[in-house]
């Protein structure tokens, strides 16, 4: 039996978050316009410094026989330090449950509010973890061919890498449970959109700048596998 590679965890202090700040620009011609003005308390928790990597995910695959994502063996996507992608919400939660069983620790996906709070890194009100300008010095985005190794860019104020760009990150909840009345509509796998889960952060493929805002919340079916989607662990 292989020994799981444990994530490097960062302690995130308790605090409050004003969700959806700054507000979505008016007349954005954007499908998922977010609401602002909701303040939520976040308890102290731990979040992985990096996305789950191919090397970490391969241990899970070898031990469980879980179906492997298509891109984990493809050139440009198969490096050990690259974020594992092509991961559905169902895959991500299966990994969390496996690691929890193997370690006796309650690993899980972050909640929507935890993710947004952690992505800010202690800053309030800015568009991105580093400020208000979309700058390729700080994140990997813009229609690139593949992701970069985790940690290729400087961390935010909490010491978390790649909260914006590189690979989308699944959150725990259904989209409609946290969207302030916005209905889920995305159905690429044919399932009822009401079951869609939250995605955050954008990816190496993301070109629309609003998709990269900390405030932005996306929705996709829990069985969707896409080359731009990965995840990170919370505890």
Image (cartoon, grey):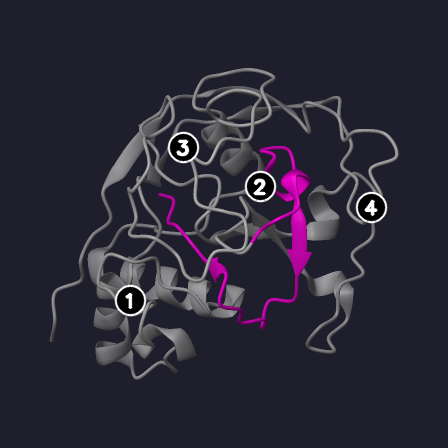
Say which residue label 2 marks. Answer: 112
Question: What element does badge 1 sit on?
Answer: helix
In space, the residues marked 4 and 1 are separated at their CA atoms by 33 Å
Mark toward the start of the polypeptide (4 vs 1): 1
The range drawn in magenta is: 206-235
Say which residue label 1 marks. Answer: 57
Q: Nearer the viewer, mark 4 or mark 3?
A: 3
Q: Are marks 2 and 1 in contact (CB under 8 Å)?
A: no
Mark toward the start of the polypeptide (2 vs 1): 1
In the image, is residue 64 part of the stretch drawn in magenta? no
In space, the residues marked 2 and 4 are separated at their CA atoms by 15 Å
**Residue at the (54%, 28%) spot, across then down:** 128
In space, the residues marked 4 and 3 are separated at their CA atoms by 33 Å
Q: Percent from the top left, x then y, of residue 68?
A: 36, 79
Looking at the rendered image, the quarter that the C terminus falls into is: top left
Q: Nearer the viewer, mark 3 or mark 1?
A: 3
Q: Looking at this view, name the residue that lies furthest to the right.
A: 27
Tell me if 12 is positioned left or right of 6 in this view: right
In this orientation, which residue lies closer to the viewer: 163 or 67? 163
In space, the residues marked 2 and 1 are separated at their CA atoms by 23 Å
In space, the residues marked 3 and 1 are separated at their CA atoms by 28 Å
**Residue 73 sits in quarter:** bottom left
Tell me if 170 is positioned left or right of 85 in this view: right
Q: Which mark is residue 182?
A: 4
Disc 1 packing (10 Å; few <14; some 14–19; many ≥20) = many
In space, the residues marked 2 and 3 are separated at their CA atoms by 26 Å
Q: Which mark is residue 137?
A: 3
């Amino acid at each position: 039996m292989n020994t799981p590679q444990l994530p490097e965890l960062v302690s995130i202090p308790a605090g409050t978050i004003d969700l959806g700040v700054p507000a979505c620009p008016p007349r954005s011609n954007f499908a998922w316009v977010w609401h602002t003005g909701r303040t939520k308390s976040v308890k102290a928790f731990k979040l992985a410094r990096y996305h789950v990597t191919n090397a970490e995910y391969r241990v899970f695959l070898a031990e469980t026989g879980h179906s492997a994502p298509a891109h984990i063996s493809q050139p440009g996507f198969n490096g050990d330090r690259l974020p594992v992608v092509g991961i559905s919400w169902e895959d991500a939660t299966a990994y969390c449950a496996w690691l929890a069983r193997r370690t006796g620790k309650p690993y899980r996906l972050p909640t929507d509010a935890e993710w947004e709070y952690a992505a800010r890194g202690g800053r309030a009100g800015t568009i991105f973890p580093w400020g208000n300008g979309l700058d390729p010095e700080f994140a990997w985005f813009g229609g690139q061919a593949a992701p970069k190794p985790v940690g290729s860019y400087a961390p935010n104020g909490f010491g978390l890498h790649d909260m914006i760009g590189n690979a989308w990150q699944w959150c725990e909840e259904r989209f409609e449970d946290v969207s302030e009345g916005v209905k889920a509509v995305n159905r690429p796998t044919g399932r009822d959109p009401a079951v869609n889960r939250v995605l955050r952060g954008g990816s190496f493929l993301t070109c629309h700048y609003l998709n990269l805002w900390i405030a932005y919340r996306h929705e996709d079916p829990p069985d969707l596998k896409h080359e731009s989607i990965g995840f990170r662990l919370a505890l």
